[in-house]
């Protein structure tokens, strides 16, 4: 049979079954696996430990580190296509896999923009995408000069290795410039060099997320734009579509995200995290190239989830409809609190709200750790947010007396 697409990886399996390799054993891999099951796609996992969220539920698991060159290369050789649960695989390993002919999706050329915030800023500036003022600072004195030029406070970030707000500092004045430089040694990212990036402090009114998916043959879809609430660098809630945003504005933002995905040659899901100013203008905060926390609402709130579309994209299958299944969709993260028995706590949540959706990740509850999320659908923003907050709050141990 003639191939339907030159881009689609060839299955090495006699049944023609594809094997997608996922590097990283977190909840994103767990939810990608769930989507892959429906498509009859085998998934193989490279995880650090057997008790990781995805490793618990998958049959084909290789235990090894994403920083172990030989383990990553051997893993890649055994898969039809390789994709990721996180962006911390050293870029050199990805390039080596590609040089061997392994299908790595997204590829190194694109993924480096999600791995390295300095590379992303340079490219976005060159492409004329909206960014805050920024500069690489070789030492504390450069950060002082940047602050004096652009005004205090400033944001300092490590170019690599940060996540969930770790590796981001609000620097209020020249007295505080030493901290990011002192702390960056603790944020190793394999052998990759880490730099300090200074950014103008954006006095945003809210944060937004634009999620798009692109396939190797260039098909792309855009999900409705979400408003996101981040607390201490962790996403706690998304509301979709972003309340109060005009269709025209939403289209412009979706178009910008599609444009970035096309220019960078992204394959799979890409999230563009944005900060919106009081006048409605936006600047890019960062890019992620994998299913993203701000897209978890799509499992129940969209006709095709980000996980299903990611699996379709890496196999170069036609992408699914990203449109909403309800006028308003709210997702709240469940962060570890005083409740250890989360499944037991569902008794109350489901009895109270029978249209509630819950995903739990099988993770040991620890304070502040992402252990699950809830999704509510409806038509009134305040009502849907209240239902989601009630359920997530209960699972976190608030007001459970
Ligand atoms: P991480 O990689 O840990 O997710 P981010 O770069 O997304 O880090 O930054 C974490 C949070 O810090 C953002 O969600 C935003 O609230 C805030 N932030 C980041 N950059 C800026 C900026 N230039 N101005 C103001 N706040 C910022």
Image (cartoon, grey):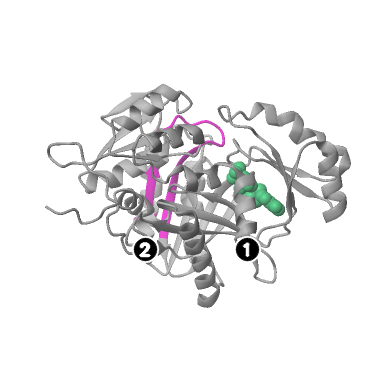
Residue 87 location, x and y as percent?
49, 39
113 and 1: which one is in front? Answer: 1
Which numbered marker is on residue 128?
A: 1
206 to the left or right of 199: left
Highlighted magenta segment, given as a residue range: 353-376
257 and 363: which one is in front? Answer: 257
Q: Is residue 167 above or below residue 132?
A: above
142 and 86: which one is in front? Answer: 142
The structure residue drawn at horizontal position 68% and vertical position 27%, both measured from the top left corner, is: 185
Does the image show residue 43? yes
Q: Is residue 302 above or below residue 390?
A: below
The structure residue drawn at horizontal position 56% and vertical position 33%, both measured from the top left corner, is: 367
> Pointer 2 and pointer 1: residues touching (CB < 8 Å)?
no
- Check if residue 354 falls in the magenta segment: yes
Give the mark nearest the N terminus, 2 or 1.
Answer: 1
How far apart marks 2 and 1 lie (CA) works out to: 27 Å
Residue 179 location, x and y as percent?
78, 34
- Check if residue 1 falls in the magenta segment: no
Element marked by disc 2: loop
Mark 1 close to ligand 1, CB under 8 Å: no
Label count reads 2
Q: Is residue 326 above or below residue 1?
A: below
Which numbered marker is on residue 322?
A: 2
Residue 104 location, x and y as percent?
38, 41
113 and 376: which one is in front? Answer: 113
Does the image show residue 385? no
Residue 157 location, x and y as percent?
69, 42
Element marked by disc 1: loop
The structure residue drawn at horizontal position 29% and vertical position 47%, both measured from the top left corner, is: 35
């Amino acid at each position: 049979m003639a191939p339907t697409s030159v881009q689609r990886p060839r299955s090495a399996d006699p049944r023609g079954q594809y094997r997608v390799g996922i590097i990283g054993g977190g909840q994103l891999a767990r939810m990608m696996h769930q989507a892959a099951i429906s498509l009859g796609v085998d998934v193989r996992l490279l995880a650090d430990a057997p008790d990781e969220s995805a490793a618990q539920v998958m049959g084909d698991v290789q235990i090894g580190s994403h920083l172990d060159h030989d383990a990553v290369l051997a893993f890649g050789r055994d898969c039809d296509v390789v994709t990721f649960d996180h962006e911390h695989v050293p870029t050199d390993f990805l390039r080596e896999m590609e040089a061997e002919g392994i299908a790595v999706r997204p590829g190194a050329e694109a993924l480096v923009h999600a791995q390295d915030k300095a590379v992303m800023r340079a490219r976005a500036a060159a492409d004329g995408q909206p960014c805050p003022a920024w500069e690489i600072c070789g030492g504390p004195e450069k950060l002082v000069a940047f602050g004096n030029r652009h005004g205090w406070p400033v944001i300092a970030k490590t170019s690599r290795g940060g996540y969930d707000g770790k590796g981001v500092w609000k620097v209020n004045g020249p007295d505080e410039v030493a901290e990011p430089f002192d702390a960056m040694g603790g944020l190793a990212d394999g052998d990759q060099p880490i730099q300090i990036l200074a950014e103008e402090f954006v006095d945003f009114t809210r944060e937004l997320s634009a999620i798009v998916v692109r396939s190797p043959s260039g098909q792309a879809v855009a999900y409705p734009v979400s408003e996101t609430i981040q607390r201490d660098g962790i996403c706690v809630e998304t509301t979709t579509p972003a309340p109060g945003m005009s269709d025209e504005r939403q289209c412009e933002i979706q178009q910008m995200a599609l444009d970035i995905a096309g220019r960078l040659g992204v394959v799979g899901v890409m999230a563009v995290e944005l900060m919106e100013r009081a006048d409605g203008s936006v600047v890019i905060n960062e890019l992620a190239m994998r299913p993203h926390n701000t897209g978890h609402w799509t499992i129940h709130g969209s006709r095709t989830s980000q996980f299903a579309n990611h699996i379709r994209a890496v196999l170069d299958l036609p992408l699914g409809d990203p449109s909403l299944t309800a006028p308003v969709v709210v997702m709240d993260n469940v962060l570890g609190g005083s409740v250890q028995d989360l499944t037991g706590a569902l008794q109350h949540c489901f009895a109270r709200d029978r249209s509630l959706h819950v995903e739990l990740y099988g993770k040991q509850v620890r304070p502040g750790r992402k252990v699950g999320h809830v999704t509510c659908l409806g038509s009134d923003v305040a009502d849907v947010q209240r239902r989601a907050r009630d359920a997530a709050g209960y699972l976190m141990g608030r007001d459970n007396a």
